[in-house]
Image (cartoon, rainbow, N blue to C red):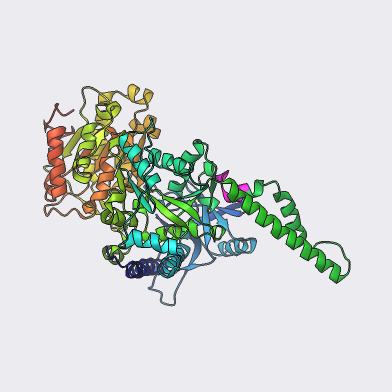
């Protein structure tokens, strides 16, 4: 890492601009791309039909739209709070050129998403009327648009971090990315009986750290539990702390855990992006629930109506001035009360730039899921703190970056990862995991965590059946399967492997027994790194009556979709099948680490061993399965899942 903090931050600013320019260019290209008939992409719905409009709990105008659901629709990037635009198709003078998309309204926001429906928060009535007027004459579409607000927050944060004259912040900055070494206090030893040895050690480091501490939590090691206790223990010494994460879902999750422990949490951010459980803790909800709000609301209404009454102009102006003064006093009082009562202020990293938090400062900042956070976003929150505690695992999913050049330039390397590498004395790794059978855990422990992980006794030998083994690899090398590319999405799929996976799933359910699976709520996760394969697998499962009774017990998603989740049984479709050993997206080993560590009791992998074993990681993985589980060879033209096997039992 460059030990010159200023040049490092300048480089981050360049990379961030590359990423933003790439996103902006991609969005502009999407506007020029033609639409033929129906279009249901992950970021676009066309055409949409306008339904009724209403007001939500926050008195925001909401418009419901509907669209025809495609039979194989799976990808849906329309999430609550994301910015969207309505558009119409604008035909050019050239009859051979496809029509371009022309936005017809300013940015709106997704409120809720259902099957075939999207509720959109519209800024005002005039905007709603403009949308309806356009819809009366032509078909409308809805698409996600670029979020420039996040970019500007990160850009401003980097600028402020470079030019800050605050001595405490400069010291923290130079400790994180410069040559200064972190300092630690000597405090009495803490030991909580509900935490294990490594968790207690991490907690001790957090309270002793003067600038920075890192809780490195591999899969299933109780990172959230440790972080919650670290926050609560810190609140024994400090009045208030700030808790952030890169996503709203992550902020809501850690906030909910703190609330369950009796901590007063004030949630800052767009209520549309919060979970239902967190709305009661939102700034807006608590503001409206304050005892003085009714008086403030009455004054605001009177001001909108011109204060009422006749009277002389000077007297009226005096009344208006007095009312405005009183309204300002109430606003300041309500705002102060909300922050004084809160022990934890929680928001996304980008949300830390929200105007409500302007001039707010916190002794300690906790960043959860820090291994998925862009460094520039972290600085937005770090600017408001005296010390920072990172929590996450840089061996799992990295931050999402769309520009390859920016990623190669280092934007994909998180601040947590950099500090871990340069200041290892800050890091406490959790080493006991409570999720997986020890054999499922073993390979990831060896490859990613230096063999340091240990399975807790209650899960180490846990299996669905004593006749079963925790690991199974179904090798498709001799099956003449073919990987293909979806021309529309450029995503890979392997239809034959997908059908084999469905057959394998049915066989496994039959072996365990449908009645037991239903009664004991055994759940299944089906994972593929490729969206096209996920789409196909969902379609195949939906087509079979056999799986209908297990509708709520079977989930199919990409690796990213399973981050932070776990299932009793995980089946992975690797997709890649070629003679050259080309594996493309599978080279992202951190994503594969996530996939391999979601299973509690059974992990099944379907893949072409000849194709995959040309890569060192997968060659070692296959050897591990052969040594610790079953390696089943699937032969062509065989209706069963295999006709030969090596391992601990015959193939079912």
Please state, as top left, top right, bottom left or bottom right, where the N terminus lies in the image.
bottom left
Frontmost residue, 269 versus 417: 417
Expressed as whole percent of the image width and height from the top left, the position of residue 418 reads 29, 57
Instruction: Tell me which residue sits at (57%, 65%) in the image.
Output: 134
Frontmost residue, 110 versus 439: 439
In the rendered structure, the answer to whether residue 337 lies left or right of residue 550 reads right
Q: Compared to 374, does 255 lie above or below?
A: above
Instruction: Tell me which residue sits at (21%, 26%) in the image.
Output: 468
| Magenta span dominant secondary structure | helix
Frontmost residue, 307 versus 158: 158
Please state, as top left, top right, bottom left or bottom right, where the C terminus lies in the image.
top left
- Magenta-tinted stretch: 279-286
Residue 197: quarter of image:
top left
Q: Compared to 316, does 473 lie above or below?
A: above
Expressed as whole percent of the image width and height from the top left, the position of residue 185 reads 37, 48
Expressed as whole percent of the image width and height from the top left, the position of residue 558 reads 32, 47
Residue 219: quarter of image:
top left
Expressed as whole percent of the image width and height from the top left, the position of residue 72 reads 36, 47
Residue 192: quarter of image:
top left
On the question of residue 59 being in view, the answer is: no
**Numbered-mark total:** 0
Q: Is residue 281 magenta?
A: yes
Residue extending farthest right: 311
In the rendered structure, the answer to whether residue 162 lies left or right of residue 488 reads right
Instruction: Tell me which residue sits at (77%, 61%) in the image.
Output: 323
Instruction: Tell me which residue sits at (53%, 67%) in the image.
Output: 104
Q: Is residue 488 magenta?
A: no
On the question of residue 362 being in view, the answer is: yes
Frontmost residue, 637 versus 225: 225
């Amino acid at each position: 890492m460059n030990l010159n903090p200023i040049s490092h931050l300048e480089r981050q600013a360049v990379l961030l601009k590359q990423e933003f320019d790439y996103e902006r260019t991609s969005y502009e290209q999407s506007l020029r791309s033609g639409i033929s008939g129906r279009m249901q992409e992950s970021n676009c719905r066309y055409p949409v039909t306008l339904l009724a409009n209403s007001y939500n709990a926050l008195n925001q105008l909401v418009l419901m739209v509907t669209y025809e659901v495609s039979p194989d629709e799976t990808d849906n990037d329309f999430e609550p709070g994301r910015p969207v635009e309505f558009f119409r198709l604008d035909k050019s003078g050239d009859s051979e050129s496809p029509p371009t998309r022309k936005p017809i309204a300013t940015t709106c926001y997704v409120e809720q998403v259902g099957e075939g429906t999207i509720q959109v928060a519209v800024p005002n009535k005039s905007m709603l009327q403009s949308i309806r007027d356009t819809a009366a004459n032509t078909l409308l579409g809805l698409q996600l648009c670029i979020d420039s607000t996040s970019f500007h927050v990160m850009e401003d944060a980097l600028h402020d971090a470079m030019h800050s004259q605050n001595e405490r912040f400069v010291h923290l900055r130079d400790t994180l990315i410069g040559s200064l070494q972190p300092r630690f206090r000597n405090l009495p030893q803490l030991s909580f009986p509900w935490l294990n040895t490594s968790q207690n050690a991490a907690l001790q480091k957090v309270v002793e750290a003067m600038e920075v501490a890192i809780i490195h939590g591999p899969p299933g090691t109780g990172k959230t539990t440790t972080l919650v206790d670290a926050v609560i223990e810190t609140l024994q010494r400090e009045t208030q702390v700030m808790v952030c994460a890169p996503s709203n879902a992550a902020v809501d999750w850690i906030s909910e855990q703190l609330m369950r422990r009796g901590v007063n949490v004030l949630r800052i951010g767009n209520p549309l992006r919060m979970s239902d459980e967190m709305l009661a803790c939102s700034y807006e909800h608590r503001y409206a629930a304050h005892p003085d709000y009714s008086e403030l609301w009455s004054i605001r209404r009177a001001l909108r109506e011109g204060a009422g009454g006749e009277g002389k102009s000077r007297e009226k102006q005096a009344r208006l001035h007095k009312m405005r003064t009183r309204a300002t006093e109430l606003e300041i009082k309500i705002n102060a009360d909300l922050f004084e009562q809160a022990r934890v202020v929680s928001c996304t990293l980008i949300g830390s730039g929200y105007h409500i938090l302007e001039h707010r400062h916190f002794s300690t900042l906790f960043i959860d899921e820090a291994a998925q956070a862009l460094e520039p976003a972290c600085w937005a929150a770090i600017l408001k703190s005296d010390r920072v505690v990172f929590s996450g695992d840089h061996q799992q999913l990295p931050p999402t970056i769309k520009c390859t050049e920016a990623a190669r330039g280092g934007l994909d390397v998180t601040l947590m990862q950099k500090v871990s590498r340069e200041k290892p004395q800050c890091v406490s790794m959790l080493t006991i995991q409570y999720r997986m059978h020890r054999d499922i855990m073993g390979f990831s422990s060896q490859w990613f965590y230096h063999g340091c992980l240990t399975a807790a006794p209650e899960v180490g030998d846990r299996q669905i059946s004593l006749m079963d083994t925790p690991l199974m690899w179904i090798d498709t090398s001799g099956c003449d399967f073919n990987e293909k590319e979806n021309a529309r999405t450029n995503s890979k799929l392997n239809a034959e492997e997908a059908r084999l996976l469905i057959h394998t799933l049915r066989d496994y359910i039959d072996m365990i027994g449908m009645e037991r699976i239903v009664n004991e709520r055994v759940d299944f996760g089906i994972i593929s790194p490729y969206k096209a394969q996920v789409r196909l697998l969902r379609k195949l499962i939906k087509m079979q009556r056999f799986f209908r009774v297990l509708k709520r017990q079977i989930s199919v998603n990409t690796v990213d979709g399973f981050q932070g989740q776990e299932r009793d049984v995980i089946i992975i479709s690797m997709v890649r099948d070629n003679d050259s050993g080309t594996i493309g997206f599978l080279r992202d080993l951190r994503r594969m680490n996530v996939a391999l560590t979601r299973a509690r009791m059974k992990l099944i992998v379907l893949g072409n061993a000849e194709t995959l074993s040309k890569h060192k990681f997968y060659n070692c993985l296959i050897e591990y399965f052969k040594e610790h589980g079953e390696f089943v060879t699937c032969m062509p033209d065989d209706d069963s899942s295999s006709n030969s096997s090596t391992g601990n039992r015959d193939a079912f």
